[in-house]
Image (cartoon, coloured by chain):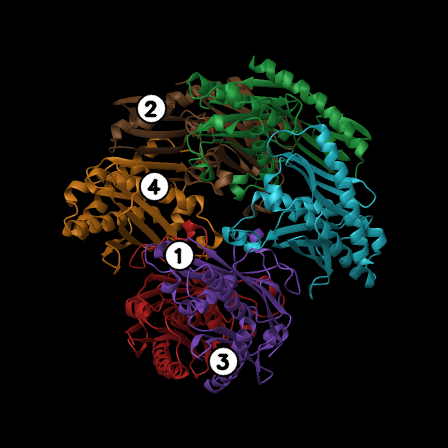
Chain colours: A orange, B brown, C green, D cyan, E purple, F red
């Protein structure tokens, strides 16, 4: 696993924020508290946590067209932001949050593989700090709202070997690519495994899952240290 | 598993086509041969297989806004059509296909859960028939291009029980929802598992995988019968 | 006139539905009851009937770009859906309908000329069945709301001869192309005549109108049989 | 029929231009010669005539949203510009025009009913002057390219009486509304008749057609005078 | 300075309107009174004045793509309409206007340089007449709402000489291009100076400002004459 | 003037990059070398420098809607990116650059007033470093391409006093707001002065210009230090 770090409170305005680095992948995460909720939750007593994801145009080796200029978010962007939102909601008690929305923005400053796993892992920190901000204002109790940690890691089979936390080169060449999202207590929130080339076997997949479990345990330990 | 059927050649125009039914979920699939390839494959000698997915507005219990009228495809639509395309490409030899593109359109006529798994499973039939059409014109050899079957099934945990091929009601209420895409020879192409409520355990997931394996074997047998 | 057929109740969800075939032109029509009305009718006591029209990408000989992907409905699509809506409203008493909206979706599964005339003719069936559904729930009286039948047919001059219900090849080659929408009692709802090549004479047009009148009488008879 | 006038050469830049007035309906028309042709005509030796239509936001009683700001042209706009283009092409020999495109822009400065018929009638003037401009540069012979006049008029049944060239108030209240496009020699190019309220009879329609024929003869006489 | 003229009341529908000409640059301006205000002013007691700007496709030497067809307003369009709105608001007492919005539409019929300065100068006339219309209905007092005149002129350095009111050819070739918006009493509302080629000196800029001051005094005198 | 700093080389991928801070306003700038040029420069031997500008959603006190999600860049965004591009081109010899494009992306990480002036000032650093990267590969000579420094500062009148480098609170409350872009040798590239409330006098404006001149001299000194 590459060197992972969290830098908290990097935004003057956001209720919670974090610059998360997984090696050369750097993601700026902010958590914004908003009083509105989505229409389908009005008067339900429940709140919502949602996420948006973006990449700066030159986060990548070649400059990509700016999504705001092209006029729409691509399929990959939408897929990732839905995944981040689902992952966070898996550890949040939406009733305890009350009728409010927290929007987590994950903006990739520099990409080198694993932007979605870094985003989820850093988003937990920003969300935590946003909830702490609310607790300081007697709006909620963090322990009631935030039920557990959540973190994510990619694993893959590259050159016939199982690898964890693939960087861009490994990811591009991997035969199998899987993303795992798990909680601090070891529950599985999301598994996405894709054969890039030839299909993979159940044994290979089980190996990746074991690797991911260990890696996520490390990430959760780092999260705990970061917010201690 | 619900009753599954394939009705072939339901389109006068398309090179391959199929009406696939998984219970009350009905999807119209066409495979269209086009001479163009995506820009990044020009002069590579390789072809491409891609998919698009749509739902008729009243395929669902409540009428949904037509995506053409709202002016964009939602995140879910884009996620599904990317999944269908990846699944088909896993069993196609793109070099043997040559510099051509096959576009598979999956349009849901009636939805009752499992539209993406029905789409993938029916798409294989339409793709197969499109390749047969090409073989009849001496463009390719089907056996060189189409390396294996591919089919998909959903499994979930519903009322604390493992269930296969969830319909809409089961899907809405499931605690865990997973989609599996596998080949005829048992290789795994794609695994997507999502905790809708509380996280799931590795044991639960392994149970779903075994269930899916059996279901997909049945689907492949039905595909074989259909194209025999 | 090509063989015309109506298959009712082909949707599990829609209040009214119909698969209409004019030869090789196949259109799936659903009628959806919605409680909302357009803003300009709020508190007027009147309802509304509107239509949307779409074509599956491979309904045609060459695959067309999906309108949802291109991000807008083309001019032809909008022109046709406005025509369908006007045609249906001509035989509906909007006050007797009450403050509700019925949206009729016409989706062309397979196209071979005359998709708009098939759509209108089939839409009457779906609308009728939707109103029957409402009558069964004591919401309206069908005889009060639905004042008459409405059906449509194309006529044209092709190879110097008047032809009715043109298929795609005839339509492409026609010198004059006209669409007629009439009611069961012979009233004219809409006439659209276009010279594709050289202008046509009043005599030619009168001939087409007579032809259309006879054809629409046949279509209305078939509608009566279908809902009997 | 309201007072009709044509003011030619009102644009410094356009090859042909005309301010056409049908009573209080004022439309600015320009005809622009462009060297490009649509892709489907490349190397065919044929040219093309096309039209675009727009309304200034305060051409109407209430200010309408600017189409450029709303980001798309509405269905009505597209329907009208397709009609103008078809009408002009009916009197142009596209082969004699050669591989060039003339784009006719009709922008409604002030609207009071009949904007599409004024547009078509004025567009013929602008097109004529554009062709004269080309003839002066030895590019074409006007008499070879422009085969006839074309003009348009609306007729309707209003308060149980046949009326020609309806203004906005008459148009809004008309029971039947029809637009006719005819050539100088009396050929019919386009007929569009719509029952706004109850369906109309064949006799009523025939009456409107006769009325239109007389009106268009007058318009053609005015066109001849204008370009004499 | 080119010949400047204002023709008032050129629209039957608009509360205020004006055709302004700066040489061959012709702009049609309408001022529309609307009862709505932007959301951020609701219940503030204040009104709003805003502007939209457009160019007819053939206002220019080469036909430009219609913004409604391309689906968005370009950066230049947005920049100009923001400038017009700010300029007008500088001389309006928004509280005295009350909770209403006046939308000023500036549509360029023919362009030959200076379309934004002609728009602002003509917009003052249309706004004035709209306010007069309101005063005649006892809605406001013009002298309370309209605090001063506002007009605009361009100046530039062309062939090493200071020039005022540049036409298209001068503007294209100018080394420095500046737009000035000033009030009747000589206050500066907006200054925009841009080096097209090499940067300009403070002395050059001061020279342009003096030139503009004189020109704007002339424009204000013409405005006074026009509304006298 | 607030504390200004430049942190160079903060992107692994971009040819030039810089994190520029003007107090609490932080902008990430990258300069990307691309082999393409805009269509109108093909075969001209000239290159191009262009800029894009964006704000992360929570760069501001309240979270703003993501422009990629809303599907278009607002007027303010377009106005600013056009200004940045013009400012940089004023000090670049486009012929000496050769047929290449450099795209400068300015993404505001945290906003507290003056984002456009910080962007321009930091963009010069990123552009300089991109050109150095090119020089190291013998593509150009920096001294031939980059003719001078360019920097920008805002000045305003706030509480009747001239202020330089306004932060968000000052900017919001300023009566007059002006942005100045100047070169290292004191030439003026762009002046934008806007009366937010009442118009300003020539004397006030001259005072702001003098203030800006001194501030920009300081910024250029800091740029020199940064790249020394």
- Determine which quarter of the picture holds residue A26: bottom left
| Label 2 secondary element | helix
Residue B88 left/right relative to A221: right
- Residue at the (32%, 21%) spot, across then down: B163
Question: Distance of mark 4 from mark 3, alpha carbons?
Answer: 51 Å
- Residue at the (38%, 57%) spot, across then down: E99
Query: In the rendered image, which residue does mark 4 sit on?
Result: A83
**Mark 3–mark 1 contact, CB under 8 Å?**
no
The reply to whether label 1 and label 2 mark residues of one chain is no
| Label 4 secondary element | helix
Q: Chain of mark 1?
A: A
Whichever of labels 1 and 4 marks the residue nearer the N terminus, that label is 1
Question: Distance of mark 1 from mark 4, alpha carbons?
Answer: 19 Å
| Label 1 secondary element | loop
Figure check: C194 above or below F213: above
| Label 3 secondary element | loop
Q: Nearer the viewer, mark 4 or mark 3?
A: 3
Query: In the rendered image, which residue does mark 2 sit on?
Result: B170
Q: Chain of mark 4?
A: A
Query: In the rendered image, which residue does mark 3 sit on?
Result: E199
Residue C219 left/right relative to E143: right
Query: In the rendered image, which residue does mark 1 sit on?
Result: A56
Question: Distance of mark 3 from mark 1, alpha carbons?
Answer: 32 Å
């Amino acid at each position: 696993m590459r060197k992972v770090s969290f830098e908290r409170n990097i935004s003057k305005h956001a209720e919670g924020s974090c610059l998360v680095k997984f090696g050369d992948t750097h993601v700026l995460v902010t958590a914004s508290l908003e009083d509105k909720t989505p229409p389908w939750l009005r008067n339900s007593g429940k709140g919502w946590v949602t996420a948006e994801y973006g990449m700066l145009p030159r986060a990548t080796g070649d400059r990509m067209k700016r999504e705001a200029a092209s006029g729409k978010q691509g399929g990959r962007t939408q897929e990732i932001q839905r995944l981040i939102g689902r992952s966070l909601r898996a550890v949040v008690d939406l009733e305890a949050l009350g009728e409010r929305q927290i929007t987590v923005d994950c903006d990739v400053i520099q990409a080198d593989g694993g932007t979605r796993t870094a985003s989820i892992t850093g988003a937990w920190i920003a969300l935590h700090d946003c909830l702490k901000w609310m607790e300081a204002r007697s709006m909620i109790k963090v322990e009631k709202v935030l039920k557990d940690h959540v973190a994510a890691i990619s694993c893959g089979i590259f050159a016939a070997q199982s690898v964890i936390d693939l960087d861009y080169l490994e990811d591009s060449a991997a035969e199998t690519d899987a993303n795992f999202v798990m909680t601090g207590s070891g529950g599985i929130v999301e598994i996405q495994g894709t054969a890039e080339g030839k299909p993979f076997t159940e044994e290979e997949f089980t190996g990746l899952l074991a690797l991911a479990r260990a890696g996520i345990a490390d990430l959760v330990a780092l999260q705990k240290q970061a917010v201690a």
